[in-house]
Amino acid sequence: MSLTQPWELPSGWSWSSLGELADHDSGEWGKDPGEAEVDVPVVRSTETRTLVADVHAAEVRSLTKTQFEKTALADEDILVVKSSGSQHLVGRPSIVLGLNGTDAGFSNFMLRLRAKEGVHARLLFGYLASPAARALFLRLNRTTSGLRNLVLDRYLRVPVPKGEPEVEQELLANLDTVEDAVAAARETERLLEELRLSTLLAAFDAPRFEP
């Protein structure tokens, strides 16, 4: 199999390239707060150690209006580490969710991917975060000196499976079902933790502290 078609896909799917499915931009680090025009959290690789970027923990930096307009994040943007001293971090993706009106940008050591019209960002991210995509990325970017920076033109050629609309809609529906189940499980866990605490307090006949 070639890198453009790494393996045979099931019916309803075909190979495309990352560059065909998403627009890309590099970020800005800016200046210390108050030194430019817009003070906003700027996401670094530190905030992308999990699958969902921790935007609200990002350091506040000062950007010009032009820099902010270019790097303003939106929900379902995908952030990719493009430069790092650790080889295993380069190319690692994280998705932006739950901004809830928060303005934020991303640093010059990150690459932003924004799904093009008709492309489902969650599916694109799910594939990029998978071991299969990571293995292809390493093959495309292997160098004798060791990988420390994202080779952009090669990265944008990473093969990505794209499904026919009805196939992707079915997959998204299944994903929604799983996410609903995860949310319900987390709520159950929270209620059980409360029950455990109440049980312990009742055992010692201690009043529960209400802040």
Image (cartoon, rainbow, N blue to C red):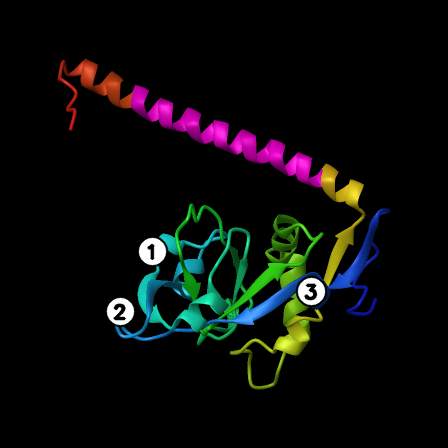
Residue 16 placement (x, y as % from top left) = 77, 62
Secondary structure beneath label 3: helix
Farthest bottom residue in view:
145
Q: Nearer the viewer, residue 56 or 74?
A: 74
Closer mark to the observer between disc 1 and disc 2: 2
Residue at mark 1 to residue at mark 2: CA–CA distance: 15 Å
Q: Residue at x 45, y 74 (%)?
A: 108
Of mark 3 and mark 1, the one earlier in the sequence is 3
Residue 175 placement (x, y as % from top left) = 63, 38
Q: Which residue is mark 3?
A: 18
Secondary structure beneath label 2: loop
* Amino acid type, callout 1: Ala
Q: Residue at x 73, y 40 (%)?
A: 169
Of mark 3 and mark 2, the one earlier in the sequence is 3
Looking at the magenta stretch, what is its main secondary structure?
helix
Q: Nearer the viewer, residue 34 or 95?
A: 34
Q: Nearer the viewer, residue 208 or 122?
A: 122
Q: Residues within 10 Å of mark 2 (few under 14, many from 20)?
A: some
Left or right position of 112 against 1 = left
- Residue 125 lies in quadrant: bottom right
Residue 189 part of the magenta-drawn span: yes
Q: Which portion, as a residue range, is magenta?
A: 171-195
* Amino acid type, callout 3: Leu
Closer mark to the observer between disc 3 and disc 2: 2
The quarter of the image holding the C terminus is top left
Q: Which residue is mark 1?
A: 57
Q: Which residue is mark 2?
A: 33
* Amino acid type, callout 2: Pro
Q: Residue at x 41, y 66 (%)?
A: 44
Residue at mark 3 to residue at mark 1: CA–CA distance: 29 Å
Residue 104 shows in this picture: yes
